[in-house]
Image (tube, helix red, strand yellow):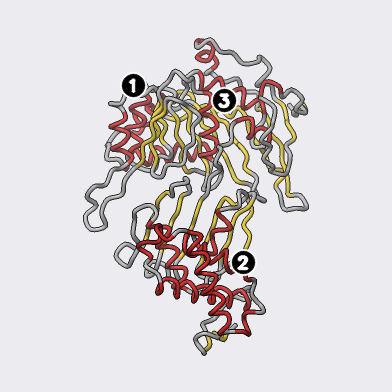
Amino acid sequence: MKHFDPFQGNFSSELPDHVDERELQFQRLKVTIHQRLVESLDFSRIDQIGRDQLSRYADQLAQHICGERKELLNRLDRERLHDELMAEVYGLGPLDRFFEDPAVSDILVNGPYVIYVERYGRLELTDAIFADEDHLMRIIRRVVSRVGRRIDEINPMVDARLPDGSRINAVIPPLVLEGATLSVRRFNADALDVDDLVGNGSMIPEMATFFEAIVGSRIGCAVSGGTGAGKTTLLNALSQFVPESERLITIEDSAELQLRHQHWIRMETRPGSVEDRSGEVTQRDLVRNSLRMRPDRIIVGEVRGAEVWDMLQAMNTGHDGSLTTVHANSTRDALARLEMMVTLSGNELPIHVIRQYITSGIQLIVHVARLPGGARRIVQVTELAETEDNHYQLHDIFGFRQTGIDEDGMATGEFFTTGYVPRCLDRIRSFGRSVPENLFEQRVFPAASHVQIIPDAPPISLIKDTPIVLADQ
C-alpha cells in the first residue's frame, strides 16, 4: 500500500500491509523531536547535562511540536512518546523493549518496517517499526559503535558482541538489496545447567548421569547441531561437570560461553582491518597460544576452519577431555565436517591418519536439534570407537525420535536407549567413577511436547520417577 507522509507532503514507497498508519506517524513524530533535540543541544556533553534535565527539556520540546500538529496530539500517547524519546537518546529506539524482555532470544530486523523476534523458540512478527531507513541506520550505527566498530560503504558488514553478551550482525547496502538488516542473538544472564535441561525436556536424567561420568573422566566430546539448536547452551551445561581443580581456556569467535568455573580464561578472536586484514587474530592463533598457558582443557566454542587440526593435536597430547561444537546435521555428518576442515587447513595427510587423530581425540558426539515448534532436544548420543579398515565405528547410545506434531504445532516424540554398552566405561571406572548397571538397558522414555524452562527443577540425583517402557526387541 502507498502511504501519505504528513511531514513530507507526498506518498512514501510501498509499505507492508501489517504497518499501522498511526504507529508510523508516531515514529516519525518521535524522530522529528529527536532531530530537534540534536540540533538544539551539544550532544558531546550529554553526560554532563543529566538525564532528568534532558527529560524535562524533551517534554517541553515535544509539547511544542505536538502543539504545531494538533491533529496528531490527540492520537498519541504522551507517556509513551516520552519513554521512547529517551530510548532514542540513550538506547536503541524501537528495539529497546525487546532487550528488556527476557523471553526474547533473537531480534531480527528486516528493514525499517519488518521486525521479528523469537520467543520460546518461535518466531513472531512484531508491531514495532522504524520511521524510515535513515532511522534504522542511525540505530545500527549506535549498536555497532558500542563495540568500537564502524559500518559504512567500505565496511558494510559487522559481526560483534555487545557488552551484555548479545551477539549482533549488521549488514547494509550494497550487500543487502532491500535496506539494512540487523540480527541480535541474546543470551540469558544465567546460563542453563543440566538440571534445567532435564527439567525442560531437552534431555533425560539417564543422559545427564552419563554426561557427568564422561566429562569427569576427561573423555573428549563434541556437540553438533544446526544454528539455534542449543549447542552453546549444552556446552555450558556440560562444563559444570569439570572438576574445579582444572584450568580451562575457552576460545571463541564471539564470546558466548558462560561457564560456572573459577579457574577459567576467556579468549576471543579479533578481526583485522578492512584494507589488509592487519591485526587479525584467528581461532587457530588462539588455540596455538593457549597451549603455552598451561591449560588442563581447551574448549573451542565452535570449530570452523584450520584451528580444528591444532585442537585435535592438543586433545592427543595431554589435553584430553577438551570440548567443542561443530555445525552438522547428524553425528556422522559432524565427522565429515571435521575431516573437511582438517583437509582445508593445509595438512596433506592420508585420510586414515586424519580419522585416527579424530577418534583418538573425540570419543563422544552429542547431536542437538531444534524441532518444529521450537523444542530443542538431544537427538543422538554416539560413541566413536577406533577406526576399523579406515572406517569409523559409530554406536548410538541414546536417541530421540519424533513421532508427530501436536495441536499447538509442537513436535512430540520419545527418548530411548539403544541397549549398546559403551566401551568408554573402562576409562570411566579407571577415574574412580561409576554409572548404574542398568543405565544402558533398551528402553523408551516418553517426552513432554512443550518446552518450558523450569529453573527450580530437582537435582539429577533426585529425579527417579521417569516413566520407563521396555522397547520392542
CA gap between label 1 and label 3 equals 23 Å
Residue type beneath disc 2? Arg
User: Which one is earlier in the sequence, the residue at label 1 or at label 3?
Assistant: 3
Question: In x, y percent, where is residue 241?
Answer: 53, 23
Quick check: can you spot residue 203? yes
**Residue 44 appears in which quarter of the rendering?**
bottom left
Left or right, 26 with reference to 341 = right
Query: For the residue carrying disc 1, how many other residues have a C-alpha within 10 Å: few (<14), some (14-19), or many (20+)?
Result: few
Q: Quadrant of residue 122?
A: bottom right
Q: What element carries label 1?
A: loop
- Residue shown at 55%/35% (left/top)? 234
Image x and y of residue 109, in percent: 52, 63
The quadrant in which the N terminus is found is: bottom right
Q: Which amino acid does label 3 sit on?
A: Phe
For label 2, the residue is 80
Label 2 or label 1, whichever lies nearer to me, is 2
Disc 2, SS: helix
Question: How many numbered dots are placed on residues in this image?
Answer: 3
Instruction: Name the spot of residue 28 as percent of width and height, x first.
Output: 53, 76
Residue ID at (60%, 20%): 421
| Horizontal side, residue 354 vs residue 37: left or right | left
Question: Above or below — where is 306 with respect to 179?
Answer: above
Mark 2 or 1 closer to N-term? Answer: 2
Report the disc number at residue 317.
1
Viewer-proximal residue among 31 and 255: 31
**Numbered label attached to residue 211:** 3
